[in-house]
Image (cartoon, rainbow, N blue to C red):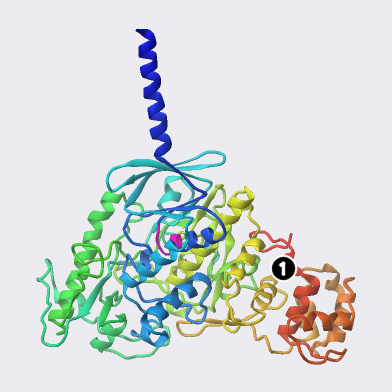
């Protein structure tokens, strides 16, 4: 009898062991959140050979791009970096070119959220090593020395575990890093933390307004799609919403209600309702609330939007604009998630602050050397609905385009985790620029590269070499420097970006309306002194060398400079290096070298980009 019982117990344990194995998914990279950054991280990691599992609570991919309805791209129109440029090309192909998506004045690229989701689904489906677990939530995250274990639950109630080597927090509000007790910042920073002249004397927990966007559709003249009058409706709440003056350009163009609506006009006679001035922004600091508390509070945001829709229809007279109930897979016509402009912000290896954006070459930290993401949107904060938020005059904060340091994605004192979306290590002020869609897409792409290298080499994300990440990004036509005049189509795209990332030749940053700029000016001459000054960081011997003048740099003067650092070459060597990458003119001692051709020489001869750097951009 005892033998029978033992055999029965053994079979039960064996069955439980088999069930446990079948309920566990093994992968290389676990991504929690299939939003803008999570989707791009998955695509990039998969293209580099990693197996990826995305855990996503909705049935869509794209997060704020799609599931939140913010389908008007802010920024990076002339910086179509990497996967952002690829996604945009898919939009062009679908709608019929760039002009077909220039339907609203807030953006050069507007699209229907459902179409954006379809494109992202196809991009992900093309990568066979990506598994997406839709309608799946996570409940627990554990880490061993070499693996992550994430407990998940599907819509049907089935519970299982995902095991992986690298974890990416791509949630909308940084929920995974908070669960793991990874330190973070929340709200407006103090000057003592960031060193920013515009920061407050004392920190607080005030975040930007969020918005529950809704998509309207023009059903044609003579139709009446007016919704039922919402509770607590008061038309005075939205009085003044037709003010369409522009704080970035100081243009005054007030009281144009149709122009207010065409702010987010989408293709096929649809409208994105995401209006800040007396519109549907709302202050709800739900970042540290429980999921249940968030759902309850977010109902206030939906009601705000419904009141605004009713105002548009009943007070402004646009009765023909009705809710596009078929845009999202929801019963109420709303997107699946709200548009969060602010999240927890990681205490990272690099705290990317305003001075690093405004004057990147003049800060103690050379973060520009470590850039893995570029952006050109201005500092844009929404504090219309809080009421008494401490005042910062964001209109006066003028910045050039910028690149985000890799260290902003890596926790300062926690191993094995990569942080993406809007939770990277930036200051509250800088978050007003890095939160925009193309930057977040780029953050995801960079996170995917870091994760794939980490898996391939069996090292932690913090051990991944910055130059390795940058090199792979360049291979995939992603910008590491924010050069408006060095696109991926430039024959020397990689070279010019690599040299820019060394800091030997520096770009010129310009604050410009809503699309800031940095110019490399490849065809300009460079002086002897400019080159000598740039090389001093790499060759201390040059600190006492004052033999360079302000004369234009020639082959002869270049040979003289490199001879003094024991890197001597000949005119013939120079000719071979230049001709090998497309230089077709005669080369002699007096040939003047533009910034383009001296970059080619520096890259081929001195190979400064090959020198390792740390998270602060110091040369190792």
Query: Any magenta on residue 36?
Result: yes
Q: Name which quarter of the figure residue 615 lies in.
A: bottom right
Crowd class of label 1 (few under 14; some 14 to 19; many from 20; radius 10 Å): many
The answer to whether residue 613 is left or right of residue 381 is: right
Residue 432 in the image, given as x and y percentages of width and height:
44, 70
Image quadrant holding the C terminus, namely bottom right
Label 1 sits on a secondary structure element that is helix
Q: Name which quarter of the figure residue 582 lies in.
A: bottom right
Residue 387 in the image, given as x and y percentages of width and height:
29, 68
> Which of these two is toward me, 19 or 609?
19
Q: Is residue 403 visible?
A: yes
In the displayed orientation, state which residue is furthest to the top: 1
Instruction: Give the residue displayed 16% in from the left and 85% down from the top.
Output: 220
Residue 521 in the image, given as x and y percentages of width and height:
65, 86
Query: Any magenta on residue 520?
Result: no
Instruction: Give the residue displayed 40% in from the left and 34% down from the top.
Output: 20
Magenta stretch, main secondary structure, is helix
The answer to whether residue 48 is left or right of residue 187 is: right
Q: How many numbered badges does the structure rendering display?
A: 1
> Which of these two is toward me, 98 or 332?
98
Q: Is residue 464 above or below residue 74?
A: above
Instruction: Give the residue displayed 12% in from the left and 68% down from the top.
Output: 230
The answer to whether residue 388 is left or right of residue 87 is: left
Boundaries of the magenta span: 34-39
Q: Which residue is mark 1?
A: 609
Q: Name which quarter of the figure residue 125 lies in.
A: bottom left
Residue 570 in the image, given as x and y percentages of width and height:
90, 80
């Amino acid at each position: 009898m005892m033998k029978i019982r033992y055999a029965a117990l053994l079979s039960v344990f064996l069955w439980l062991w088999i069930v446990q194995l079948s309920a566990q998914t093994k992968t290389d990279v676990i991504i929690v959140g299939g939003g803008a950054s999570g989707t791009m991280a998955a695509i990039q990691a998969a293209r580099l050979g990693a197996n990826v599992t995305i855990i996503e609570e909705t049935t869509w991919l794209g997060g704020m791009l799609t599931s939140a309805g913010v389908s008007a791209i802010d920024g990076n129109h002339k910086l179509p970096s990497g996967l952002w440029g690829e996604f945009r090309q898919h939009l062009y192909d679908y709608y019929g070119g760039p002009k077909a998506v220039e339907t609203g004045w807030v953006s050069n690229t507007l699209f229907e959220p459902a179409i954006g989701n379809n494109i992202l689904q196809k991009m992900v489906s093309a990568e066979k090593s990506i598994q997406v677990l839709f309608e799946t939530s996570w409940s627990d995250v554990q880490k061993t020395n070499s693996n992550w274990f994430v407990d998940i639950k599907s819509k049907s109630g089935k519970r299982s575990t995902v095991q992986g080597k690298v974890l990416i927090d791509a949630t909308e509000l940084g929920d995974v890093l908070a669960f793991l007790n990874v330190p973070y910042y929340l709200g407006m920073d103090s000057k003592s933390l960031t060193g920013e002249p515009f920061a407050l004397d004392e920190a607080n927990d005030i975040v930007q307004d969020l918005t529950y966007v809704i998509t309207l559709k023009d059903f044609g003249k003579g139709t009446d799609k007016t919704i039922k009058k919402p509770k607590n409706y008061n038309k005075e709440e939205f009085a003044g919403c037709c003010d369409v003056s522009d704080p970035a350009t100081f243009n005054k163009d007030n009281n144009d209600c149709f122009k207010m609506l065409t702010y987010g006009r989408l293709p096929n006679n649809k409208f994105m309702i995401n209006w800040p001035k007396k519109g549907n922004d709302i202050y709800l600091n739900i970042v540290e609330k429980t999921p249940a508390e968030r759902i309850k509070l977010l109902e206030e945001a939906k009601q705000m939007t419904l009141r605004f829709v009713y105002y548009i229809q009943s007070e402004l007279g646009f009765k023909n604009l009705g809710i596009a109930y078929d845009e999202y897979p929801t019963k109420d016509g709303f997107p699946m998630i709200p548009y969060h402009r602010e999240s927890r912000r990681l205490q990272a290896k690099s705290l990317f602050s305003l001075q690093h954006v405004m004057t990147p070459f003049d800060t103690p930290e050379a973060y520009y050397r470590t850039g893995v993401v570029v952006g050109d949107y201005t500092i844009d904060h929404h504090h219309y609905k809080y009421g008494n938020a401490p005042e910062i005059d964001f209109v006066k904060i003028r910045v050039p385009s910028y690149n985000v340091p890799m260290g902003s994605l890596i926790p300062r004192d926690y191993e094995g985790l990569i942080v993406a979306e809007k939770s990277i290590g930036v200051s509250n002020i800088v978050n007003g620029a890095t939160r925009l869609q193309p930057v977040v897409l780029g953050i995801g792409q960079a996170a995917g590269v870091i994760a794939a290298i980490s898996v391939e080499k069996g090292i932690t994300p913090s051990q991944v070499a910055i130059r390795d990440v940058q090199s792979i990004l360049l291979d995939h036509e992603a910008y590491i420097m924010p050069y408006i005049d060095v696109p991926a189509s430039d024959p020397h795209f990689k070279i010019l970006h690599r040299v820019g990332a060394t800091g030997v030749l520096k770009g010129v940053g310009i604050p410009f309306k809503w699309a800031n700029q940095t110019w490399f000016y490849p065809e300009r001459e460079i002086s002897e002194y400019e080159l000598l000054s740039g090389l001093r960081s790499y060759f201390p011997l040059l600190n006492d060398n004052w033999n360079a003048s302000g004369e234009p740099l020639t082959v002869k003067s270049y040979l003289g400079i490199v001879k003094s650092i024991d890197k001597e070459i000949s005119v013939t060597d120079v000719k071979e290096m230049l001709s090998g990458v497309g230089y077709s003119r005669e080369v002699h001692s007096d040939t003047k070298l533009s910034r383009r051709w001296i970059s080619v020489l520096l890259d081929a001869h001195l190979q400064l980009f090959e020198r390792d750097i740390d998270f602060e951009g110091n040369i190792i």
